[in-house]
Image: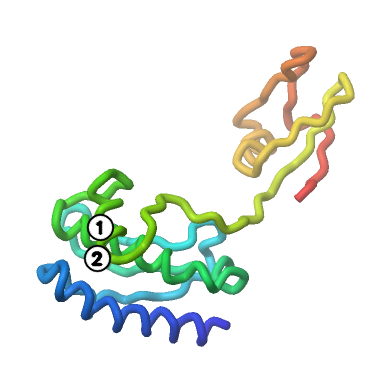
Amino acid sequence: MTYALTQKIQELKREFITILAEKYPTVKIDNIPFVTNSRLKRAAGRVEWNKATLAIRKVDFSICLFSRYPENLRSTFVHELAHIVQIKTMGYTDHGSYFKAIMASLGETPRTHHQMEVKRKIYAYKCGCGQDHKIKIVRHNKIQRRQAAYRCQTNGQRIDHTTPYVRVS
């Protein structure tokens, strides 16, 4: 899958080099690496850039998500390309009206977030009142490192590193 995904990304890059030359002639993507990344689990794509020089280091695409949702690659590619155009023309990037106008001019519906289902680690902590508190990985890790404790909204009991829990997803 990785090879096929890399090939499809390179095809899209070749296609959009021509399109960008017509619509945004000052923006060049020839020398920017467009690569796959197995570490991206929730983000579909990411532009890595230097804010001081406005140089684009690389563009990453999630192997995890595109192995399950290959039909979303084109819209994500255009999304990341819109970030590049905005960085090169404005010196910053966001998901505002200019970003959306760039996406539309490149032939995609302006969306700021993908609709692909992502897997999240969730833990259920059992409270003294019998209620299960579903806690995501960041809070779970803080609880386990004893950096945070939370309270039950029902009875005010502390939910901390001694509270029993199970991983539910």
Name which residue type carries label 1: Ile
Q: Is residue 168 visible?
A: yes
Of all residues shown, which one is farthest toward the top?
Answer: 155
Count of numbered tags: 2
Q: Residues within 10 Å of mark 1 (few under 14, many from 20)?
A: many
- Location of residue 61 with respect to 83 vertically, above or below: below
Mark 2 element type: strand
52 or 122, nearer to the observer = 122
Give the colour scheme of this rendering.
rainbow
Q: Is residue 130 left or right of residue 101?
A: right
Q: Residues within 10 Å of mark 2 (few under 14, many from 20)?
A: some
Q: Which residue is mark 2?
A: 56
Tell me which residue sits at (81%, 38%) in the image: 165
Name which residue type carries label 2: Ile
Earlier in the chain: of badge 1 and badge 2, it is: 2
Q: Residue 81's image quarter?
A: bottom left
Residue 62, image x, y percentages: 50, 67
101 or 45, nearer to the observer = 101
Q: Is residue 31 visible?
A: no
Rendered-image quadrant of the N terminus: bottom right
Q: Residue 66's image quarter?
A: bottom right
Residue 138, image x, y percentages: 60, 41
Tell me which residue sits at (37%, 84%) in the image: 11
Mark 1 element type: helix
- Location of residue 93 with respect to 10 vertically, above or below: above
Tell me which residue sits at (75%, 50%) in the image: 169
Say which of marks 1 and 2 sits in front. Answer: 1
Q: Is residue 15 left or right of residue 61?
A: left
Pointer 1 and pointer 2: residues touching (CB < 8 Å)? Answer: no
Q: Which residue is mark 1?
A: 102
